[in-house]
Structures are given as C-alpha cells and as structure tokens.
Amino acid sequence: KMSSGAADLRQRKKQNCMESDKMAPEERNKENSKLGRSPKYMLIQRFAKLFFGCLAAVTSGMMYAVYLSTYHERKFWFSSRQELEREITFQGDSAVYYSFYKELLKAPSFERGVYELTHNNKTISLKTINAVQQMTLYPELIASVLYQASGSEEVIEPVYFYIGIVFGLQGIYVTALFVTSWVMSGTWLAGMLTVAWFIINRTDTTRIDYSIPSRENWALPYFACQVAALTGYLKKNLNCSAEKFCYLLVNASTYTFVMMWEYSHYLLFVQAVSLFLLDSFALAQTEKVHEVYRIYLFSLIVGYLLQFENSALLVSPLLSLVVALMLSKSLQMNMKKSTFVSRLLKIMYVYLVLTVAVTLNFLLKMFIPHKENEHLLKFIEVKLGLNTTKNFTMNWLLCQESLQAPSQDFFLRLTQSSLLPFYILVLIICLFSVTQVIFRKICGEPLKETVKLEDGRIGERPEIVYHVIHTILLGCLAMCLEGMKYLWTPYVCMLAAFGVCSPELWMTLFKWLRLKAVHPILLALILSMAVPTIIGFSLWKEFFPRIMTELTELQEFYDPDTVELMTWIKRQAPVAAVFAGSPQLMGVIKLCTGWTVSSLPLYNDDDLLKRNENIYQIYSKRSAEDIYKILTSYKATFLVIEDSICNEVGPVRGCRVKDLLDIANGHVVCEEGDNYAYSKYGRFCHEIKMNYSPYVNYFTRVYWNRSYFVYRINTVISFQS
C-alpha cells in the first residue's frame, strides 16, 4: 500500500508539473494579448530583468567581499606584518582551526596530512584525537586541496588564500540573501535594500570581523543558499525546470551545510519545525515539504558515514522529528479519507508527531552510544532557572556575552538603521494575513490556486508563511541568547526588505483599510518603489560616510608581549615541551609554535572541558602542591601565567575567572548578603611570583614580560627554603 501510494504521489506530481508547464505560457499569452504586447517583447523584458537582477546580486556579493578584505587589511595591517604577527590575530578556537590548515600544507602529501589529523597525538598531551571529526575540519581539508591543486603556492601566501575563501563565502552569503528577497518580492530593489541593511548592521549580522575561521562563517553561506533555493521551491505554479533546479540546490546546500558545522542539525531542526507548522496548516504542497524531509534524512545519513560515524547526528532532534513526520504521514496516507479514524488522526496529527519524535529520540539516546554534549542540557536547565550550580564550566558559559540575553544596545542599533520598525510592520501584516488564511480554511473556504495582486492575500503564499514562521522561531532564540542574533538578524534584513518592496504586502494592508479615495493597486505599486527608495537614500546619507571612514581609517593592532612570548618559545623551549595555561592562549601557542599543549579552547568535548577547568586552577587559591599534581598529571613541562587573568578587573563581579573558581572550590563565604573569599592559601598566580618556598621548589621562572610569566615545572623537586 505504501509503495502504490508513493507511486500515485509521484505520478500526480509529474502530471501537475506537465500541466503547469502547458498552462503557464497560455496564461502569459492571454495576459500579453490583453495588454497589446507581443510574446517576443515580453521575453526580452523578462530576460533583461533577470540579467540585470543577477548582475546586481553578483556585484553586491563581490563588493561585500572586497569591503571585508579592505577593512581587514586596515584593521590589522596584514600586508606589512610578519607571519608570526599575522597568526596572532587569530584568537581562541580560530587559532586552532587555522593551525590544522597549516599542518595539512606542511604534510608530505594530502593523504598523509589527513591521516595525521585523524590520528592526532601531537596537539593535546596524553590524548589521541580524530581532529577532523571532533573539530569539523572539512573546511580546512577543502582549502588545503584547493590551494595545492590550483598551484597557488607561487602566487599567494597560504593565509591570504584561506581568508580569501572565507571572504568569498561571505559574498555568496550576501548574494543568497539578495536572491531570496528578490524571489519573494519580485524586484531586485528588495535585494539591494537587504544588502544595505546587512552591511550597516554588520556588528549584529556576522562575526567575521573577529573570528574568521569559525565554523559558522564557513557554513552559514551554504545555509543561506539552501534558504534561497527552498524559497523558490515552495512557490506555487513553478515550472518544472525551475523546480528541479531549486530541488537540486536545496539537496546540495543542505548536505554541504551539515558537513561544515557540527551544530548545523540544530538549525535545520528549527527549519524543519517551520516546515512542519506550514504543512500542518495545509499552507504548502505536502509533496514538496516531504521531499525536503527526505533531503534532511539523506544529508544526516551521508553526514554520519563521512564524519566517521558521528553518533551525534543519529541522536539529533532533527532525525527524530523527520522520521516521526514521515511515519505519521504514511499512516495518514494509508487511511481511507472517509473514515472517522482518518479525521481523528488529522486532528491529532501534531500531537502524534511530537509524541513519536520525543519517544524515538529517547530510544535512540538509550541504545546508541553517543558523546552528545551533556553540558549543553545542563546549561539549558541553569539558563532557564530550573537548576543552580557551582560548577566552574557552567558558570563560565553563563557569563559569556554570546550566551546572555541581548542588550538594549542591540535593539537600539537595529532601530537607528530603521530595520527593526519596518521588520515589525512587515511581520504584523504577514501574521494577520496568515491568520486570516487559516481561519478561512477552518471555515471550509478553498485557497486560490493563483494569488493575484488585487486579491491582497499575501498570507496564501507558502514561501512567505515559511519565512514568517522561521524568523519568529529564530527571533525567540535570539531573545534568549545574544549569540543567536547572527542567525536571526540576516533574515530580519531580508524579510523587512521584501515587505517594503512588495506591492502584495501594501495591497494586503489597503484591503484591510478599504481605501476608496485612491486606487489601491496604483498606490501599492507606487509605495513599493517610493518607500525603499526613501529608505535607501536616508541610509546612504547617514551610514555611507561611516563605512568609508572605516575603510580609510588606519587602525593599530599590535601585541608585542605575545610576539615576544611566541618568539621565546620557538627559540628556547625544547621540542618535547608541553605547555599549560588558559585554553585561549594554548590555541595561539599551538598555531604560532606547533608545540604540544595541555588544553584547547574547544567546548564540545567533556574531557577537554574538565581539563580546562583543572588547568584554570592556576588562578585559584590552591596550594603549590595541588597545582603541581594537576599539571604533571597532564605531562605539562611549562606553565604560562597571564597577568590579564590573574589581575582581571571585570565589569561584572562574579564573572571573572578567579571569582568563578572561588565559587566552585568553596572559597567564598556569604555573610549578610556580601561575598568574601576565604582560603588558607593565597591565590596561586600571585604567590608564585614572590619566588619563595614551596613555590620555587616546584616551579622555576624561565621567562617573563609585562603580560606573561613562564615557569618550568620541575621534574626533581628541591625542598630548599
């Protein structure tokens, strides 16, 4: 029954496709004959519109990539720096990713380089890791292959090639947003406005300024391409060739997105929920939505196999939801439409899907061995106020700016650029229109096959409803975690630009207002051109001088203390040395020197998180013996103390590293509402600088400057006073 049902589904889809291909030219010819236009004239007009629109989209992406490159050069003086000084600009996890790119280029062959990364025991002491799987290094694999295969060794330096690819992907990102807004509104003026808002609000749309190699900068351009293709795929009355092209693009971009970012399946889960709600209200073709579900399933399975059997994809909520949706739909298909059970199943469809999805996810986690981030669930509990903890890692994560609620400055910036007011206006109009459509369906009124401008029913377009649901869900996440704004704000730019440039949206508003003094269609067409033009001129006048100032103003980024530290390590430290210190600094040491370190700034592995917490104890109030035992347990031979952490004066008391350690270690006493730090030992990072026993028995200072103190960890302990 299931196979015959699926065959009937494909046959109906093929017939509908052929019918739409036959009907579309006839309808256009009738419309053209009414307007007195020849088909040849209309073909030339459509081609010109498509050509200039594509030219504008590609030009926007290229200009943005050039803008990023120019800004980066002005900020870091990259071309006038030595290699070591350039590498220091990569901080935290960015340094780790780029260090593996360097290792791949230094390997005698690509195959050998991949083997060394998948069996890596030279990065973290006492730990062999599959770096490709654990750190999602597919971007670095691709970049190294392209660099060597294209013969770029004699033309461009590796670092320029690497950041050039990332900047190029950001150009594709902007182009995809342009195309999405263009497809939705029918005018590439919306795409231009999307790009303008995106660049003006760059602080809130991308992290490219200070974290070039981060996974999201590699992955989100592919997701934007997927969203653009999905927007076209969901459109009604789409001809067969365009539908196939959109389907293939959705397939390719979804798979690539899964391979590029370890958290991609969570974002696809949000998208799947949006499509599920769209299908539940019967506002889109069910066959198309379920084709997208199959794409998710295919991408997860292939991703699981190519990511060295990554069990996190099997226990992901996306897989459970997709399987539940497909099972529930197959049950519905096999029910006779006239039966009472079928009607009851339609009413209980949402409940059924959610129940099956949750149950399946629970069973998968129970039977499949996985290393899914347990600290993520604990973090959510603490974040929602369901639990409290003294755990250092949890409290440290809660103190990160990206994991806190967005500040008022964020909303103020969006308002000053006029983005937020127009987004709210467009969202309200679309929501009311969608609500009307749902109410009509409940009342039994059928939807129109083709929505015309004079109908004023923008809520009947499935691609519009999808984007409304999607931005609302992403917006809810962004209201909880500021880091999620980088996923939400780009689509705010796109939806707001689409709305103000869409005659259908203005017509929907005028239908409610029942305008009679002025012809509503004419007014809608005028406003869809006038409003974005006025917005564009005001943005140009206010923000263009600021952008040009950014590009012409030379900024100074120089860290001589870090340069001196890296130079000393490369010249003086033995080859077998293992360094211990803060994870962020260890990432830079790994990149700039290649020496083995005891920890890394990566937060997707429980063992690494425990290491980070233990090594951070060098800034706590613990004895020299305790610290010595911790460091030697990881075979560390050198210790680096950072003055900036030891003497940190943070804006939020209680979020400094030393405060969090005192809380975790029970060295805080609360009396009458005030917190007092108490321990029989002084703070280790202060005491070790005094050069007295017992600290000198365990550690010998070998190098220092204004910011860093380096100590050799003694293998033979001398207890001299």
Image: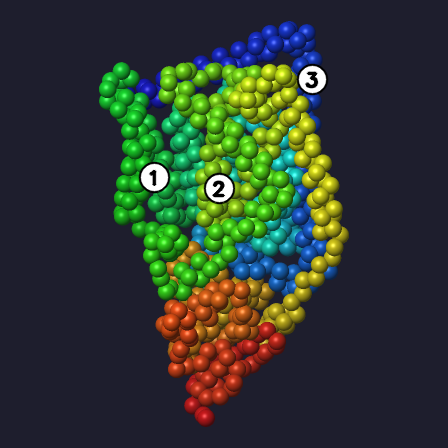
Mark 2 or mark 1: which is in front?
A: 2
* Disc assigned to residue 44: 3
- The span from disc 2 to disc 3 (Cα, nearest Å) is 41 Å
**In the figure, 322 relative to 694: above or below?**
above
Q: Residue furthest front?
A: 517
Q: Residue at x 57, y 40 (%)?
A: 420
Q: Identify the mark nearer the N-term, 3 or 1.
A: 3
Label 2 sits on a secondary structure element that is helix
* Disc assigned to residue 320: 1
Q: Identify the mark nearer the N-term, 2 or 3.
A: 3
Residue 610 image offset from top left, x and y in percent: 39, 64
Q: Residues within 10 Å of mark 3 (few under 14, many from 20)?
A: few
Q: Residues within 10 Å of mark 2 (few under 14, many from 20)?
A: some
Q: Identify the mark nearer the N-term, 2 or 1.
A: 1
Residue 559 image offset from top left, x and y in percent: 65, 67
**In the figure, 100 relative to 358: above or below?**
below
Q: Residue at x 65, y 25 (%)?
A: 527
**In the figure, 658 relative to 188: above or below?**
below
- The span from disc 2 to disc 1 (Cα, nearest Å) is 24 Å
- The span from disc 3 to disc 1 (Cα, nearest Å) is 48 Å
Residue 448 image offset from top left, x and y in percent: 47, 16
Q: Which residue is mark 2?
A: 475
Type of amino acid at the residue the image marks with label 3: Ile
